[in-house]
Amino acid sequence: MRTSSFLILIGCLMLVALACELPMAGLGTPTETPAPTKVAKPLASATPAKKVPPTETPVPTPTPVPLPAAKPIKMNSPEYGAQAFLWWRPETADRDLGMMKDAGLTWVKQQFAWRDIEGAKKGTFIWENADRAVQLANAKGIDILARVDNAPDWAAPGCFDEKKKQMGPAKNTQDWLDFLTAFVTRYKGRIRAYEIWNEPNLSREWCGRPPNPTEYIALLKVSYEKIKAIDPNAIVVSAGLTPTTRNDEVAMPDATFVTKMYDAMKNNSTGYFDALGVHAPGFKAPPEMSPDDVGKSKEYNNNDGPAGRIYCFRHVEDIRKIMEQRNDKNKQIMILEFGWTRDPIHKDYSWFAVDEQTQAKYIVAAYQYAKKNWTPWIGGMFVIYMANPDWTEQSEEYWWSITKPDGIPVGAYVRLKAMPK
C-alpha cells in the first residue's frame, strides 16, 4: 500500500507539472489580425517589383498589435504621408516605415493589388504580404491608405499586360465586391482609408478601353456601399487622376473626368466618396506658381499653351473649383501623389527635371503652401516615394523618390524631416 500510494502521489505531481507548462485551449491572447496563410509565390502586379530570391534566414512574423484608435472622417489640414513599397521586402518595409515615422509622416500609401491576393482563382487568398504590411504600419502608429485595384486574370481575362503597365476592373463587378468584402472585413479598423482604383482617366488603367467616368462612378458607388457596410469609420477616396492635356481614347484630362464624374453623380457625391483623390506632380514649376502663369509660359507649359496650366502643383485648385461649382465644398481633397523629379535620363521626364536641392525645397514649400492656403479643404498629402528597394537609376520612378533604394535619404527627405508639421 505504501508503494501504491507513493506511485499515485508521483503521478499527481507529474500531472500538475504538465498543467503548469501547457497553455489551456481557448485562453490564448486574441488578435485582431488573422494568422497569415501558407506562403505562395507572389503574383505579378501592374508595376511589379523585381522578385526577391528566397533566403535561408526567415524574417520573423510581426507581433500582433492592438487595434488603432478610430479617427474622424474629416482629416487635419493637411496630414502628411508618403507612398511606400511594403509588399515583397519585410526588412526594407520596416526600415522605411521607421524613417517615415522619424520624419513626422503619419500616413503611408500602399498598393494592395487584387491579383496579388486572390490571383490564382476566386476564393483562394494569399494574405501573408498584406498582413505583414498592415501589422508593420499599425505597430509604427502610421495610418494606411490602401490603393485597391488590378483585377486578376480570372476576373478580367485579357486585361492585364505587364509590358504596357495595363490593368483594369473585373468583368463581373460582383467578383470585385466579393474580394472587397473579404479584404475590408479582414482589416476593419486597421486600414484608415481606401483608394478605389488608380488613374481611370487613362485607358491603360481601364483594360485598354477609353476612359469612362460613368463606368468608374458606378464602380465607386458600389465599392463605397460595400466598404461602409463593413467599416463605417473608413475613409473612401476616389481614384487619383493623371494631369494630362490629351483628350482621346487613350487619355482624358483630369478636370474633364472630374466634371463628368459629377454629371454622373447628378452633383451629389453622397454615397460615392468621402474625399476626392487627385495627383499633383509639380513638373518644372515652383509650388507657388499659379496655373494661369504656367499656361502663359512656354518654359513651364511644355508648349501646350493655355492647356498646359495642368503642369503645376496648384492645378489642384482647378479641381477644387469644380467641386465648389457643383456644391461639394464640404468634402476634402486628398493629394495621393505629388513631387518633383531629378531625372536626367528619360527624355519624357527630363524636360521638367530639377536638381536635388530644388526638389527638396519645392516639396517642403508645397506642404507649406497647402497648409497656408488650402485649409480646411485639403486632407492627406502623399509625397512620392519612399523608394522601392529594387529600383535602379534606369527606373524613372527612382528620380522622384525622397530616399534611395538602399534607404539612404536624399535632400528632400532631410528637409522634410526638419520641416515643422
Image (tube, rainbow, N blue to C red):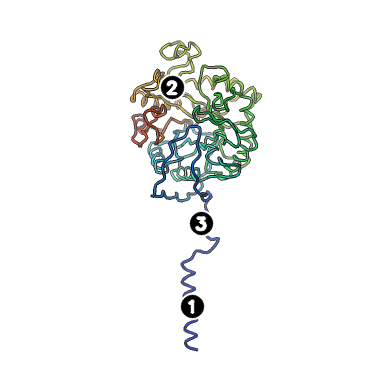
The tag earlier along the polypeptide, 3 or 1, is 1
SS of the residue under disc 1: helix
For residue 239, side relative to residue 369 (left or right): right
- Residue 396: x and y in percent read 41, 26
Q: Is residue 347 above or below residue 95?
A: above
Classed neighbour count for the residue bearing mark 2: other residues with Cα under 10 Å, few (<14), some (14–19), many (≥20):
many
Q: Quadrant of residue 387?
A: top left
Q: CA distance from mark 2 to mark 3?
A: 48 Å
Q: Amino acid at mark 1?
A: Gly
- Give the SS element for disc 3: loop
| Marker disc for residue 29 | 3
Q: Mark 1 highlights which residue?
A: 11
Q: Residue at x 48, y 39 (%)?
A: 143
Rendered image: mark on residue 282: 2
Q: Quadrant of residue 326?
A: top right
Q: CA distance from mark 2 to mark 1?
A: 77 Å
Local secondary structure at mark 2: loop
Q: Gap between marks 3 and 1, in whole Å? A: 30 Å
Q: Amino acid at mark 3?
A: Thr
Of 35 and 347, which appears nearest the observer? 347
Residue at horizontal 51 percent and vertical 34 percent from the top: 75
Mark 2 or mark 3: name the one nearer the start of the chain. 3
What's under tag 2, amino acid-wise? Gly
Sequence order check, earlier mark of 2 and 1? 1
Residue at the spot 43% in from the left edge and 27% down from the top edge: 367
Do the residues under discs 2 and 1 have CB atoms within 8 angstroms?
no
Q: Nearer the viewer, residue 56 or 382?
A: 56
Residue at 50% of width from left, 63% of height from top? Answer: 23
Location of residue 351 (image quadrant): top left
Q: Nearer the observer, disc 2 or disc 1?
A: 1
Of the residues tagged 3 and 1, which is closer to the observer?
1
